Image (cartoon, rainbow, N blue to C red):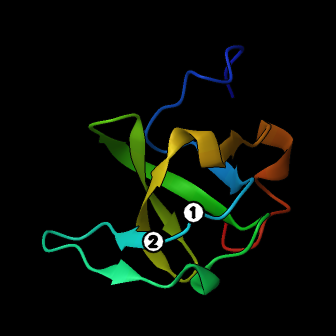
């Protein structure tokens, strides 16, 4: 992936390290959703960077706007073994 964990790019695979108190969908007209739709360890793909150090991330259960502090980049060797890859 990248040497600097803070350096993320669209298309990178990430894991959720903590669940935000509320989820906001990554849609043209965003909706607030309950946090129980995601769990720690869920893996997703970065769709693009948004203002405020936030990323649009596609998970198995939808696409959400997630703060970078909730995300951990996955090493390249986990790509083949991850669900939804």
Judging by the rendered image, the residue that carries numbered circle 1 is 20
For disc 1, the neighbor class at 10 Å (few under 14, some 14 to 19, many from 20) is: some
Return the residue found at the far front. Answer: 21
Vertical side of 9 occupied by 22: above or below: below
For disc 2, the neighbor class at 10 Å (few under 14, some 14 to 19, many from 20) is: many
Could you tell whether 24 is left or right of 60 in the image?
left
Vertical side of 20 occupied by 34: above or below: below
Asked whether 16 or 23 is in front, the reply is 23
Q: Residue at x 22, y 73 (%)?
A: 30
Vertical side of 15 occupied by 42: above or below: below
Label 2 near label 1: C-beta < 8 Å? yes
**Disc sitting over residue 8 in the figure:** none
Q: Position of residue 63 (x, y in %)?
A: 42, 70
Return the residue found at the far top. Answer: 3
Could you tell whether 52 is left or right of 71 in the image?
left
Q: Position of residue 40 (x, y in %)?
A: 77, 66
Q: Residue at x 72, y 74 (%)?
A: 39
Q: Quadrant of the C terminus?
A: bottom right
Kindly state the secondary structure of the residue where label 1 is placed: loop
Judging by the rendered image, the residue that carries numbered circle 2 is 23
Quarter of the view holding residue 82: bottom right
How far apart marks 1 and 2 lie (CA) works out to 6 Å
Kindly state the secondary structure of the residue where label 2 is placed: strand
Q: Position of residue 47 (x, y in %)?
A: 39, 52
Q: Position of residue 49 (x, y in %)?
A: 35, 39
Q: Residue at x 31, y 66 (%)?
A: 26
Quarter of the view holding residue 41: bottom right
Asked whether 29 or 82 is in front, the reply is 29
Could you tell whether 76 is left or right of 7 in the image?
right
Q: Quadrant of the N terminus?
A: top right
């Amino acid at each position: 992936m990248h040497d600097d964990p803070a350096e993320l790019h669209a298309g990178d695979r990430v894991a959720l390290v903590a669940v935000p108190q509320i989820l906001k969908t990554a849609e043209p007209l965003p909706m607030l959703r309950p946090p129980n739709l995601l769990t720690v360890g869920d893996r997703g793909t970065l769709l693009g960077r948004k203002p405020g150090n936030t990323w649009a991330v596609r998970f198995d259960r939808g696409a959400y706007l997630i703060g970078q502090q909730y995300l951990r980049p996955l090493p390249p060797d986990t790509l083949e073994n991850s669900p939804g890859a």
